[in-house]
Amino acid sequence: MAAYYTFEDFSGTAALSNSDNPYDGLIETCNDDPSKIQAVYEKHRTNRNAQQKAKLLAPDFPGVVIDEMLANLETGGEDWRHCLVFWARPPARIRELIAEVQRQLLLAAPSMWIMPPSNLHMTALEVTHSRTEQEIFSLVEQLSSAAHDIADYTIDHRARLIKPVISFDAQALALSFSPASGEDEARYSYHHLRRDVFNKVQAAGVKVESRYVVPSAHLTVGRFITKRDFEVDGAVDHDKVAKLVETIESINAWLEGEIWSSPQGEWRVGEEKGLDHRQGKLWYGGGETVYLGKGY
């Protein structure tokens, strides 16, 4: 992965556990307290945005990082990477919110690649990635007896996501949520859902090989496929990069001030659609659905 695109945990939380499930550590560290789990997720995204802002605004910033594979796909290329996942699909009101966020981002980065509405997803669990087609077919077969139970799991295990903000780095931008907590909440969080899906996949005999388990609940909304928006005569235009950062912070202020307290500011995972068990060339939201879980 590019140097400016990292899966480092910025929460500063030492999530240690004897469990072979990497999601257990945070739950144990937080004493299974949803408010503490929420605080870790928020600390991660806040610290990460601060670090990335400093990098983008640094005088020696080398420029945005182009997703070469995606740029190649846009001109007729092929993506060889086959993956296997369980995705959470956003409901209509969240897709509408993302469309408005994308519209505002395009004012500062008009050449940015925008994730199409039908491709929007949050990865509840990446089972594996960058495999051959035949390897994925084999894993799909191994998971076949458990896939429906996993994808339908959100019917009775309803995790709520709140407080959306834009998270960013030099390669991509995402809408990042926080797992809900509070006296009116059940104790079941999005992090618990990630843990349970991991356990169910492993119990089916399939080894989980995720790229990351950091405390993040995000949907990618855009990626950079050219540097043209931020260069002049081949050199980085730091004023244009600063304008992008200013735009992101303006959107985040709007989200916090107007959206957090509205219905558009929350998402119950599994409403409209259950988890999407998906295979194939899905890095940018494509691929094929093996089984789509029942929504509520």
Image (cartoon, rainbow, N blue to C red):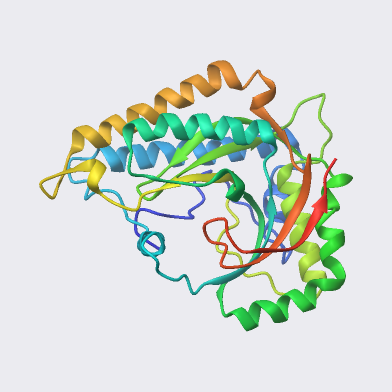
How far across and down, in percent of the image, does residue 274 sit? Answer: 79, 49
Of 7 and 98, nearer the camera is 98
Residue 12 visible here: no
Q: Can you say which quadrant of the picture contains the N terminus?
A: bottom left
- In the picture, residue 57 is in which quadrant? top left
> Residue lying farthest front?
76
12 sits left or right of 138 in the view: left
Above or below: residue 243 compared with residue 130? above
Residue 137 visible here: yes
Q: Can you say which quadrant of the picture contains the C terminus?
A: top right
- The residue positioned 68% from the left and 63% from the top of the image is 278
- The residue positioned 84% from the left and 34% from the top of the image is 186
201 sits left or right of 75 in the view: right
- In the picture, residue 219 is in which quadrant? top right
> Residue lying farthest left?
233
- In the picture, residue 5 is in which quadrant? bottom left
Above or below: residue 125 compared with residue 266? below
How far across and down, in percent of the image, does residue 159 sit? Answer: 77, 40
How far across and down, in percent of the image, does residue 181 sit? Answer: 74, 31
> Residue lying farthest right?
156
How far across and down, in percent of the image, does residue 173 sit? Answer: 45, 43
239 sits left or right of 28 in the view: left
Above or below: residue 203 compared with residue 198? below
- The residue positioned 57% from the left and 62% from the top of the image is 282
Of 182 and 148, nearer the camera is 148
Q: How many marks?
A: 0
